[in-house]
């Protein structure tokens, strides 16, 4: 049988799976995704930095409160701890520093119960400390009664931590801590 053109196979044209418009749209979608992910990096870095600073602040506050507790229990004198909490320092304390035993934390004593705390090279904060009475409640057989202990028996140490120390006071992050200390001699 001879073919007269009726049964001739047409030459196949190569099939294109994607055209240029589809490729451009796919590249735009990928670029938007990559840009969105890259934009999240600064947010993540800032959150990590803040979490580390929060951890350092809590660690320095814990060390400082226990350091002051040790000083109080050695000699029950409220030195460098004011009962007036109305004074808010707006400047960073300066002066000679003392390193707390067993830590990398340096205390620079300021005035009015304020301290500059340097913990290694990573954290610096201003600590403001004051004391308040310790309140307790007891049942006297007929009713609950509240009273406070005299400062000679117990005090509550209040500590405001603000960081970073280099920033103005109103721009610093702040946290409050409280610890009750009882006189071991009473």
Image: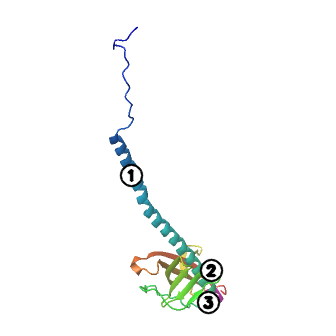
Q: How many marks?
A: 3
Q: Is residue 132 visible?
A: no
Is tag 2's residue or tag 1's residue first in the polypeptide sequence? 1
Q: Position of residue 126 (x, y in %)?
A: 48, 82
Q: Residues within 10 Å of mark 3 (few under 14, many from 20)?
A: some
Question: Observer-nearest residue: 114 or 122?
Answer: 122
Which element type, helix, strand or loop, lies under badge 2? loop
Q: Nearer the viewer, mark 2 or mark 1?
A: 1
Q: Is residue 23 above or below residue 2?
A: below
Is 88 on the left-hand or right-hand side of 145? left
Is tag 3's residue or tag 1's residue first in the polypeptide sequence? 1
What residue is pinned by disc 3? 76
Magenta region: 72-76
Q: Quadrant of the C terminus?
A: bottom right
Q: Quadrant of the N terminus?
A: top left
What residue is pinned by disc 2? 103
Q: Position of residue 54 (x, y in %)?
A: 51, 71
Q: CA distance from mark 3 to mark 2?
A: 24 Å
Q: Give yes or no for residue 174 being in the magenta stretch.
A: no
Q: Nearer the viewer, mark 3 or mark 1?
A: 1
Is 114 on the left-hand or right-hand side of 68? left
Q: Nearer the viewer, mark 3 or mark 2?
A: 2
Q: Residues within 10 Å of mark 1 (few under 14, many from 20)?
A: few
Residue drawn at 40 percent across, 49 percent down: 30
What residue is pinned by disc 1? 31
């Amino acid at each position: 049988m001879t073919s007269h053109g009726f049964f001739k196979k047409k030459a196949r044209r190569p099939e294109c799976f994607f055209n240029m418009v589809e490729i451009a749209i796919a590249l735009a979608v990928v670029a938007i995704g990559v840009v969105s992910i890259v934009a999240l990096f600064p947010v993540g870095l800032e959150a990590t930095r803040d979490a580390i600073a929060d951890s350092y602040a809590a660690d320095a506050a814990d060390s400082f409160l226990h350091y002051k507790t040790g000083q109080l229990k050695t000699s029950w004198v409220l030195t460098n701890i004011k009962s007036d909490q109305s004074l808010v320092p707006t400047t960073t304390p300066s002066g000679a520093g003392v390193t707390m035993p067993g830590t990398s934390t340096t205390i620079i004593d300021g005035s009015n119960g304020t301290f500059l705390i340097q913990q290694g090279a990573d954290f610096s904060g201003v600590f403001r400390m004051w004391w308040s009475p310790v309140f307790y409640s007891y049942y006297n057989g007929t009713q609950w009664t509240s009273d406070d202990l005299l400062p000679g028996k117990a005090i509550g140490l209040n500590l405001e931590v603000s960081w970073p120390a280099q920033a103005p006071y109103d721009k610093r992050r702040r946290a409050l801590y409280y610890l009750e200390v009882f006189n071991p001699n009473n």
